[in-house]
Image (tube, rainbow, N blue to C red):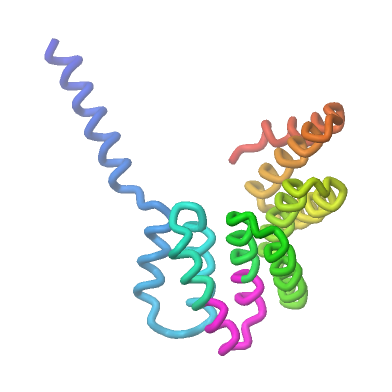
Amino acid sequence: MRKPLLLFVIAALGGYNVLVGQQKPADSLMNALRSHKKNDTAKVNLMNALAQESRRAHPNLTDSLVKISLELSDQLNYKKGKGKALAIQANRYYDLSNFRKADTTFEEAKQLLKSANDTSALTYLYRSQANLLMDEGDYSRSLDGFLQGLKLAELTGDVKQVVDINRTIGYLYNVIGDFEKAIPYQTPALKQPQ
């Protein structure tokens, strides 16, 4: 009786230590941002990463971070940072069902990110904008956005984005009732390690 109980306690303590020892990405980003005193592009990138990570859990924090990131990006003439902040802001408009404002903000962000040649942020933008278009029922433009994002994600080797976009394209085809076209996108998404 003692041996199984002892093994259970050891396993429970080990599991607890693993859980306590792991920091959430948002906590790590917040600590990095707090320790970064210089107003530079690295600070903008940290604010954008934290805003993106905390968008759903802490929307007010995200709104504040985006506002500061936009101001600092303008001061630094940092197109990449401003474009990413605008893409996050567009997602916040989308979260609030302000689709018109989201769409115009996505377009503004897209121009900046293209001029900065930021393929990672463009992948995020295309996927987010395509979700908005799908919710609006504009399936053709949505599919175009997903395919553009998928192409960029594959070029940069971003496996997580590739999986998420493939899965969502499959979902889009299911929504419009074209189940046969969904399969080639959903199957690879299921096979990819996350």
Q: Nearer the viewer, residue 162 or 103?
A: 103
**Does 83 appear in magenta?**
yes
Q: Residue at x 39, y 65 (%)?
A: 30
Q: In this orientation, does residue 109 appear?
A: yes
Residue closest to the far left? 2
- Above or below 58: residue 83: below
Toward which corner of the image does residue 73 lie, by quadrant?
bottom right
Q: Quadrant of the N terminus?
A: top left
Q: Residue at x 72, y 57 (%)?
A: 129
Residue range corresponding to the magenta coloring? 69-85
**Does 86 appear in magenta?**
no
Q: Nearer the viewer, residue 35 or 138?
A: 138
Q: Residue at x 58, y 60 (%)?
A: 92
Toward which corner of the image does residue 10 lie, by quadrant?
top left
Q: Quadrant of the C terminus?
A: top right
Residue closest to the far top? 1
**How many tags in the picture?**
0
- Above or below 2: residue 145: below
Q: Nearer the viewer, residue 58 or 75?
A: 58
Residue 137, percent across and down? 80, 46
Q: Is residue 141 left or right of residue 192?
A: right
- Above or below 57: residue 14: above
Q: In this orientation, does residue 46 appear?
A: no
Residue 132, percent across and down? 71, 52
Q: Nearer the viewer, residue 47 or 41?
A: 47
- Above or below 194: residue 129: below
The chief SS type of the magenta part is helix
Residue 50, percent across and down? 48, 63
